[in-house]
Amino acid sequence: MNYSLQMHNEQLGLADDDHPHIAPVVIDFLSGKTAYRRKYGHVGGEAISKAVGIKKGHRPNIVDATAGLGRDAFVLTTLGCRVHMIERSKVIAELLEDGLRRACQDEKIGEMIKNRLSLTCGESQKELLQTPFEPEVIYLDPMFPQKEKSALVKKDMRMLQEVVGPDEDADALLRLALTIATNRIVVKRPAYANFLAEIKPTTSIKTKNHRFDIYLTPRH
Ligand SMILES: C[S@@+](CC[C@H](N)C(=O)[O-])C[C@H]1O[C@@H](n2cnc3c(N)ncnc32)[C@H](O)[C@@H]1O
């Protein structure tokens, strides 16, 4: 597997050099499925909204400590939360940075993005100790080995998996997050997966393919 970052039409993309016919992965908050969700009332966003504790008149401050392609962070931002993303892969962080740059220039959502969505490239076990605001919620979506045959896994997720590899410190990250979040930690897992660090959550919210495990913290 060989990947490279390439600039096309002022968009940074991650290209699969072994399969040049496949379009590069680009982080685009302005079009595609992510933008559709924003425009048409957050299709599929209800579970994540409940999981992080969004209520009438309350939008928690969230640190997404496993930012990846920024999709969940963007949904949470458009739901009204202030979200700080942390991503340790330099390549993925560059894609995020580029997606953020373009989103900030957009007439419709630029101001919202500037005010509510930020990014640090680094290790979350270090960066969680110096976040720009005290996180009420820490959101974790570590890489989980896919059950499906690789051809069935979506292109973006397959590339992400190959570029960043397994998140072997995910259990330790949850243990640290439990000492920092003032309200809760939300862990996104495939529906069939065991609990992270084998720690039983306070409660879970299930969707067709996923589960959000919610750990209310003692400071809650
Ligand atoms: C499954 S992806 C997250 C996908 C993301 N929720 C989305 O909506 O696009 C996991 C990402 O978390 C990052 N990650 C995992 N553990 C990390 C850590 N300890 N510090 C920083 N980044 C981490 C990985 O590099 C990977 O890009």
Image (spheres, grey):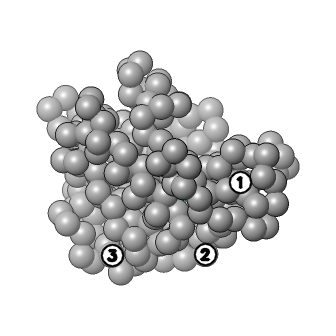
At x 23% / y 56%, what residue is drawn?
136
Instruction: Mark yes or no: residue 33 visible.
Output: yes
Q: Closest to the observer: 157 or 25?
A: 25
Q: Which residue position is annotated with label 1? A: 158
Q: What is the spatial separation of the Cα atoms under label 3 and label 2, in whole angstroms? A: 17 Å
Query: What is the number of the mark on residue 127?
Result: 3
The x, y position of residue 2, in whole percent, is 75, 68
Circle 3 or circle 2, nearest the eye: 3
Q: Quadrant of the N terminus?
A: bottom right
Query: What is the number of the mark on residue 168?
Result: 2
> Residue flagged by tag 3: what amino acid is it?
Glu
Q: Secondary structure at mark 1?
A: helix
Of labels 1 and 3, earlier in sequence is 3
> Residue flagged by tag 1: what amino acid is it?
Arg
Pointer 1 residue Cβ closer than 8 Å to ligand 1: no
Q: What is the spatial separation of the Cα atoms under label 1 and label 3, in whole angstroms? A: 26 Å
Pointer 3 residue Cβ closer than 8 Å to ligand 1: yes
The x, y position of residue 112, in whole percent, is 22, 39
At x 22% / y 48%, what residue is drawn?
114
The x, y position of residue 160, in whole percent, is 63, 58
